[in-house]
Image: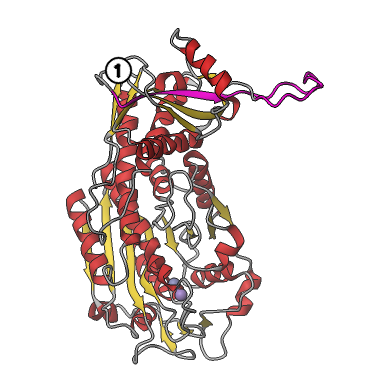
Amino acid sequence: MALPEISLNPLSKVQAPSAALLAFFQAEPKEKGKEKKEEVVTHDLPVFAGKKIKELSDLENYLKGANCFWGKKNETLLIRAYRFGTASNLGLIGLGKKTALDTDTLRQVGAATYHFQKKEHLKDVTLDIQSILNTVRESKRAYSLQAFCEGYLLASYDYREFKKEDKSLFYPQGIELVGLKGKDFEKARDKARALVESIFFTRLLGDKPGNALTPKELARLCQEMARSNGLTCQILGAKEMEKEGMGLLLGVAKGSAQEPQLIVMEHKGGRKTDRPFVMVGKGVTFDSGGISLKPSDRMEEMKYDMMGAATVAGVMQACAKLKLPVNVIGYIGAVENMPGGKAQKPGDIQRSVSGKTVEITNTDAEGRLVLADVLEYAQKQNPQAIVDFATLTGAVIVALGTVTTGIMGTHKGLIGVIKAASEATDERVWELPLYDEYEEDLKSHYADIRNSGGREAGSQKGGTFLKFFMDKKYPWVHFDIAGSASHRKDRNYFSSKHGAGVMVRLMAHLLQNWKTLK
Ligand code: MN
Ligand code: ZN
């Protein structure tokens, strides 16, 4: 699927666009005490985001009488057969209150603009973006444009691999943003495009069903992506993992007919001597729960249990496309968790790369087993920092919903830069604690640790289990994306029934601005 075009021009060059779009702010409420006593149900008219132009007075009169558009955030209205310049239709886009305009609003408005075009079948539109950007500080204008473009492009995602071709489907061709000149703006637009292409790779991997995305197919797609972006990619099969002593990962794979894969991608953007930044992703291509079988309700959503892996793959792609100045290694442990005849059973004890033993008390707590082995293996690279991404616990959905990602870790400095990148990119994260008390519940009579410890504080216990396999000298943070990786409702630039692709923008920002941790 090709992304829609975004062209930047100081003057509109589209001869006869399907519509000209005008952006409006919502009127700010009047000060208290000045309201009239008799309540008249009228709304304040929206405020045009730009200089007064003479064509507007007719429109303002129309809006006064029509009671149909208030300039609320993401509100849209098409006025058909309303001539405006060379356009034969006029579209109105709401920006919300002027005092509340921020980058995420612009990202959302970008998405609303694309959805509006799609709904109204507007092939190409023009929008005076300068009038919007003039209301933000000059130093933030290029990034604000990037945010608008990100939202616009992210909204264009669709996944129809297994649907028959439908000629009646309409996809907008693109948008022309008018009023901007300069290399900085072009760079911002191109950066948005590179990020969104990477996020779409993450989403695509997630949306593929379990039978189409086996561990081997995931490895093949990563290899193909790596090759076309100039990354190195190495793949280890079951035999090689046996040699490395990955008993925990291999234990999970035992119940499946699919061979597990370890995928290692590398981006060399830093100096030769720089220690790598390491990422690890959980790639359970389907999670049935194994012998501790899940209930059948919504089990189909377990095809998304590889979104951690997909996040790593998307960030690796972004590293290459944006030429980020860091050495980065991305590891993916790809397995399928099934209850076949050879499956591991509750009570089984498996051994990790470093020789630690784990009593498997719940075969559905398999993600942490996969991660533990890959984290131990990855630490051999002497990383300067290490992060992992995983749809690890249902508990994180209960605690935080789908709107934010749970993070936890052992290094304040690393958590700090992650929170700063979260602020900068509007990709929300929320820190959960890793108190020593959680270790109590993971004690085993028979082994060094057990993999499941009751329902309370489930996400933190998942994190505590991983911490058991981490050498303290490596700054480490675990991202639990079980809630944020896929959504059940449409929300701005995320759509329901599709992978969300969260944390790719955050990680790209973090790596772009990476400094050695103190
Ligand atoms: Mn599971
Ligand atoms: Zn899982």
> Residue at coordinates 51% horizontally, 84% vertically from top-left?
448
- Where is residue 435, by image quadrant? bottom right
Please report the bounds of the magenta region as a residue range.
Answer: 17-42
Relative to residue 451, is residue 195 drawn left or right?
left
How is the protein colored in the picture? secondary structure
- Where is residue 63, by image quadrant? top right
Check disc 1 and report the residue beneath it. 12
Residue reaching furthest to the top = 54
Q: How many marks?
A: 1
* In the image, residue 381 above or below residue 33: below
* In the image, residue 277 above or below residue 11: below
Relative to residue 216, is residue 200 drawn left or right?
right
Majority secondary structure in the magenta region: loop
Relative to residue 133, is residue 204 drawn left or right?
left
For mark 1, give the secondary structure: loop
> Residue at coordinates 51% horizontally, 79% vertically from top-left?
451
> In the rendered image, is residue 328 in sight?
no
Residue 263: % across, % down = 27, 66
Residue 84: % across, % down = 37, 16
